[in-house]
């Protein structure tokens, strides 16, 4: 890559990474389409991070793509290969399509990219840096590995491709980073689906600030029935999630809240009275769609544990 072209590419790419750090600090690592499409300003030019194309190069970049995007459709595991790698499909079937050529050049030059994986429609888990480390024309896929963001921190005007080495330590670090992406996809996907089903509202107190909401598992995800599906979840604020996980409260199969007798008998401040004691026997908010509502069988199983904990 010519030196001037390299400098422009590097400065824009580093600015994109810094912007993502700022946005994820505010919004978390799942970002909405409109924010990513709006992007950031670089010396008077708007730089979006995505478009309708899966392999995206903003106009300001001379040659190489900035991001790759996967839609929310399809099971997550289909996007992962052996040895903790990501699989990214070609654009179409033409090996020499210009977007495929762009990714192949990024692989050759060891240029870091942004990976945007749809967890629900219109919301994307942002991961950076990722590198194209392989090309499989027979399967029409590129092989991609994530790396730790700290690898790029402190760089101001250069992206040293020699940092992407193949020592055992570097390979293990990238495998761990990619494995973490897989785990985050499952966790964030579950949260986003549950919060969307409950219209970003706490099922118990009706708080509507998504930043203060969690997706609580009815049956823990460490157990066979603890699948990351909406009927095994409840949208709860941080207080009620903590109380639910601690078996201070539960939701019965009839969708009413029960508070442990010991909590009902306590004498404390207004938070205890209104936040916990006051929700006893209250009906929870449930999703509009019947198939998304909490599974009564899972609630019954949880209720048995609650009774034993009391």
Image (cartoon, helix red, strand yellow):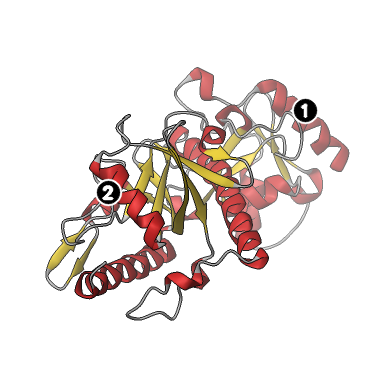
**Viewer-proximal residue, 100 or 196?**
100
Q: Quadrant of residue 304?
A: top right
**With 30 as the anchor, is 168 left or right in this view?**
right
Where residue 286 sits in the image (x, y, percent)?
51, 29
Image height of 239 relative to 73, above or below: below
Residue for point 71% across, 43% down? 249
Say which mark, if any, is on residue 93. Answer: none
- The residue singled out by tag 1 in the image is 301
Image-quadrant location for residue 216: top right
What residue appears at the point 57 percent right and 41 percent down from the top-left corner?
Answer: 186
Q: Residue furthest top?
A: 290
Q: Position of residue 153 (x, y in %)?
A: 46, 76
At 42% from the left and 47% from the top, the residue drawn is: 208
Give the quarter of the image for residue 19.
bottom left
The answer to whether residue 2 is above or below residue 82 is below
* Residue 197 percent location from the top left of the image: 46, 32
Residue wearing tag 2: 56
């Amino acid at each position: 890559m010519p030196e001037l072209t390299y400098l422009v590419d590097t400065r824009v790419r580093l600015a994109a990474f810094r912007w993502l750090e700022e946005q994820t600090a505010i919004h978390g690592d799942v970002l909405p389409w409109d924010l990513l499409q709006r992007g950031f300003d670089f010396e008077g030019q708007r730089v979006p991070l995505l478009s309708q194309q899966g392999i995206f190069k903003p106009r300001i970049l001379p040659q190489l793509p900035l991001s790759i995007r996967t839609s929310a459709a399809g099971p997550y595991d289909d996007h992962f290969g052996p040895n903790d790698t990501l699989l990214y499909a070609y654009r179409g079937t033409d090996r020499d399509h210009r977007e495929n050529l762009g990714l192949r050049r990024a692989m050759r030059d060891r240029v870091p990219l942004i990976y945007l994986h749809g967890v629900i429609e219109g919301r994307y888990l942002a991961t950076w840096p990722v590198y194209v480390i392989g090309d499989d024309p027979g399967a029409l896929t590129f092989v991609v590995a994530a790396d730790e963001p700290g690898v790029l921190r402190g760089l101001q005007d250069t992206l040293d491709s020699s940092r992407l080495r193949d020592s055992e330590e570097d390979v293990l670090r990238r495998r761990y980073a990619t494995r973490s992406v897989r785990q985050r996809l499952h966790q964030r996907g579950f949260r986003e689906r549950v919060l969307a089903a409950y219209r970003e509202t706490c099922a118990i107190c009706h708080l509507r600030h998504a930043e203060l909401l969690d997706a609580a598992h009815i049956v823990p995800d460490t157990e066979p029935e603890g699948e990351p599906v909406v009927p095994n979840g409840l949208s709860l604020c941080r207080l009620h999630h903590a109380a639910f996980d601690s078996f201070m409260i539960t939701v019965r199969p009839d969708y009413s809240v029960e508070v442990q007798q010991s909590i009902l008998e306590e004498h404390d401040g207004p938070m205890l009275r209104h936040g916990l004691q006051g929700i006893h026997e209250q009906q929870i908010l449930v999703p509009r769609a019947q198939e998304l509502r909490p599974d009564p069988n899972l609630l019954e199983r949880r209720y048995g544990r609650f009774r034993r904990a009391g």
